[in-house]
Amino acid sequence: MNWDDDTDTSTPAAGSADRLVGASADGEDQAVEAALRPKSLDEFVGQERVREQLDLVLKAALARGATADHVLLSGAPGLGKTTLSMIIAAEMGAPIRITSGPAIQHAGDLAAILSSLQEGEVLFLDEIHRMSRPAEEMLYMAMEDFRVDVIVGKGPGATAIPLELPPFTLVGATTRAGLLPPPLRDRFGFTAHMEFYAPAELQRVIHRSAQLLDVEIDTDGAAEIAGRSRGTPRIANRLLRRVRDYAQVKADGLITRDIAATALKVYEVDDRGLDRLDRAVLEALLKLFAGGPVGLSTLAVAVGEERETVEEVAEPFLVREGLLARTPRGRVATPAAWTHLGLVPPQAGGPGGGQQGLFGA
């Protein structure tokens, strides 16, 4: 169970932090996740390929009596990157130091961290793609040669003093691997991309979390929550806690399929994991613009949200679910969107038949 993922240090788009189905973690999520985190690869649910490969990397390093290769973990928020970094440290029997790219704005910030590392220590650098360029260039040498050059003085009298570092393992995490420069990517000995979870895997996550939280839940109840969790363990655990609250107040505490469905209806999360914002975007696209195409700014005005909120918060999941498509002419609803909202698409060329006929296009 690895929902806890990163201590997501990226700046969330407006309107994303308070969403029940948002993948970023607030203070409450981080506190609960700390108690629910798996402590070893054997406890970690899902990501079978990544777990198998990482297990080989760590066991080989232990057999050689060496530090593990640097590890790069990429994937969406909430999939378990922070959890895996802590497991790497635990499996290697090493301490872990946690920081983030946005916190390292100067090369001196990074030098201070690196110079205080112990031999074999794991340095977890979250949102590594947001680190400053000078610090990034210093990291190249630190990763490859376990050495950094500290500049003393300014101007013509500046002197570079080489500082030897103890062998350490860097675990970098990023939600946007494409923003990492190739020289940095190439210095990682092991790179893993974390995938969204299948419903069956999320059910295992939910059952494990329910046991740790002392929550009674049956198989159908776990399946109902898993199906609305967007393939993300962090969301699954958040929904579980909200359904638990409902079951304790409105029922006898046991979470069944009916209890889970009723509770999530109260919280406006439908059977595919769409919330109020997602449905507002789809309804505007279908009812006001006949399925599109329509420009992003126009769509944002129609739902009363900022352009960035629609683009960064609502659209990624709608696109991944096959409910919305981004085209050069604008956003277009798919047949699945009409079906999901129980609407009938207009006939091509008929009244309300979309925007294709505008200006003779």
Image: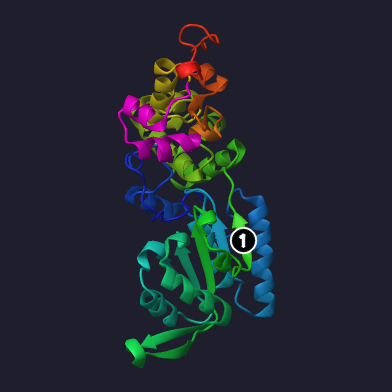
Residue 21 visible (yes or no): no
What residue does disc 1 label? Answer: 191
- Determine the image quadrant of residue 59: bottom right
Q: Is residue 186 magenta?
A: no
Q: Residue at x 69, y 79 (%)?
A: 64
Tag 1's secondary structure? strand
x and y percent of residue 297 in the render? Answer: 36, 32
Looking at the picture, does residue 127 appear above or below residue 242?
Answer: below
Task: Give, as a single range, the part of the protein colored magenta.
Answer: 292-317
Between 345 and 339, the one lying in front of the other is: 345
63 relative position to 289: left or right = right
> Label 1 amino acid?
Thr
Q: Taken as a whole, is the magenta stretch helix, strand or loop?
A: helix
Q: Quadrant of residue 299?
A: top left
Please tell me which residue lies in front, 259 or 113.
113
Report the residue at 43% width, 91% height from top: 161
Callout 1 environment at 10 Å: few (<14), some (14 to 19), or many (20+)? some
Instruction: Determine whether 229 is above or below 98 in the image.
Output: above
Is 299 inside the magenta-drawn segment? yes
